């Protein structure tokens, strides 16, 4: 009896070792292939710096499969480990039958418009055919500017200040538009640069008079909220991303009730 139990333990241990081997579970099917994940979350990343992540790609079939990327996102490049960017772009990266390889994703954001929340969806082609657009890998990150810790100790810095943090438009009828104005002031000793403005949704637009604000200068930022298709309490956030190292992200609010 003891020998029988011992044999069972050995068999179970062997199965466990196999299940925890190098081959990952097929978390995300992409066409005929299996990907180890369907999303990459990079968290906070610095603007103009390079970051890398990987996805394991497994081919469970009996034939070699050609894999490639479809579409282009600025600041994001992919290739298979050991392969070339050209192979990836032409859709000729090969995954051997019953084999697996590693997809290398390289991210480096260099544009002002990419600061703040960033999201894209990586799509693929298999054997020259575009895979279902719903099958792919999402990539998201919060892109922030990297300020020199030495320079932040000096006096020559921009400083963003708003005349108010919140505007309450009270109550309006659905379909009406609300306009509000925030005044942004540079109380620093260096030009304040508004790099990007984000709003909660497309129903809210914010446009400053100018994006480079001299020391001591005031600039009006006009905000318009379109209530078409909205109802109930509304709270819209306007995020001003700038080169003030102490307040690189300034949040303003427009709120009220739509009946």
Image (tube, rainbow, N blue to C red):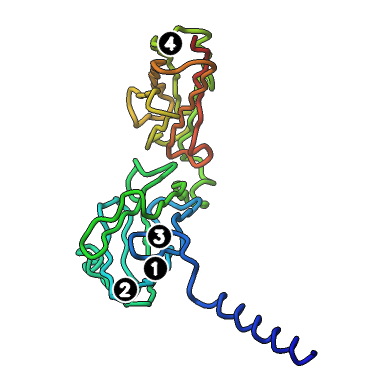
Q: Nearer the viewer, residue 32 or 152?
A: 32
CA separation in Å, label 4 and label 1: 49 Å
| Front label number (3 vs 4) | 3
Say which quarter of the image contains residue 39: bottom left
Residue sitting at 40 percent across and 13 percent down? 179
What is the quadrant of the N terminus in the image?
bottom right
Between residue 82 and residue 166, name the one nearer to us: 82
Secondary element under disc 2, as helix, strand or loop, is strand
Q: Residue at x 45, y 36 (%)?
A: 158
Q: Earlier in the sequence, mark 1 or mark 2?
A: 1
Sequence order check, earlier mark of 2 and 3: 3
For the residue carrying disc 1, how many other residues have a C-alpha within 10 Å: few (<14), some (14-19), or many (20+)?
Answer: many
Q: Are marks 1 and 2 in contact (CB under 8 Å)?
A: yes
Badge 1 marks a residue whose secondary structure is strand
Give whichever of discs 3 and 1 has the lower sequence position: 3
Q: Secondary structure at mark 3?
A: strand
User: Distance of mark 3 from mark 4, alpha carbons?
Assistant: 43 Å
Give the x, y percent position of residue 168: 53, 13
**Residue 174 shows which numbered tag?**
4
Q: Residue 198 at x, y = what percent?
A: 41, 32
Q: Disc 2 designates what residue?
A: 95
Q: CA distance from mark 4 to mark 2?
A: 55 Å
Q: Which quadrant of the structure image shows residue 206?
A: top left
Q: Earlier in the sequence, mark 3 or mark 4?
A: 3
What whole-number distance in Å separates the C-alpha atoms at marks 3 and 1?
10 Å
- From the viewer's perspective, is residue 99 above or below residue 134? below
Residue at numbered disc 1: 57
Q: Residues within 10 Å of mark 4 (few under 14, many from 20)?
A: some
As measured in the structure, the alpha-carbon distance from the residue carrying label 2 to the one carrying label 3 is: 15 Å
First along the sequence among labels 4 and 1: 1
Determine crowd level at label 3: few under 14, some 14-19, many 20+ residues with C-alpha closer than 10 A: some
């Amino acid at each position: 009896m003891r020998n029988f139990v011992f044999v069972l333990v050995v068999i179970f241990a062997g199965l466990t070792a196999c299940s925890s081997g190098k081959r990952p579970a097929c978390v995300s099917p992409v066409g005929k292939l299996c990907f180890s994940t369907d999303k990459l979350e990079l968290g906070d990343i610095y603007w103009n710096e390079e970051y890398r992540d990987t996805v394991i790609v497994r081919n469970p079939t009996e034939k070699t499969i050609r894999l490639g990327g479809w579409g282009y996102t600025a600041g994001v490049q992919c290739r298979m480990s050991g392969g070339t960017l050209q192979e990836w772009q032409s859709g000729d990266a090969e995954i051997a039958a019953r084999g697996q390889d590693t997809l290398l994703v390289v991210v480096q954001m260099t544009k002002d418009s990419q600061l703040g929340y960033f999201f894209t969806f990586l799509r693929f082609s298999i054997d020259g055919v575009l895979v279902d657009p719903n099958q792919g890998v999402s990539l998201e990150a919060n892109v922030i500017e990297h300020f020199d810790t030495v320079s932040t100790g000096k006096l020559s810095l921009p400083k963003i200040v708003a005349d108010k943090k919140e505007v309450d438009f009270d109550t309006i009828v659905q379909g009406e538009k609300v306009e509000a104005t925030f005044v942004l002031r540079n109380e620093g000793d260096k030009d304040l640069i508004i790099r990007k403005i984000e709003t909660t949704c497309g129903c809210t637009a914010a446009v400053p008079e100018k994006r480079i604000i001299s020391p001591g200068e005031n600039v009006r930022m006009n905000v318009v909220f379109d209530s078409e298709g909205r109802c109930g309490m509304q709270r819209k956030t306007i995020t001003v991303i700038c080169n003030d190292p102490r307040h690189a992200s300034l949040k303003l609010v427009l709120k009220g009730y739509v009946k």
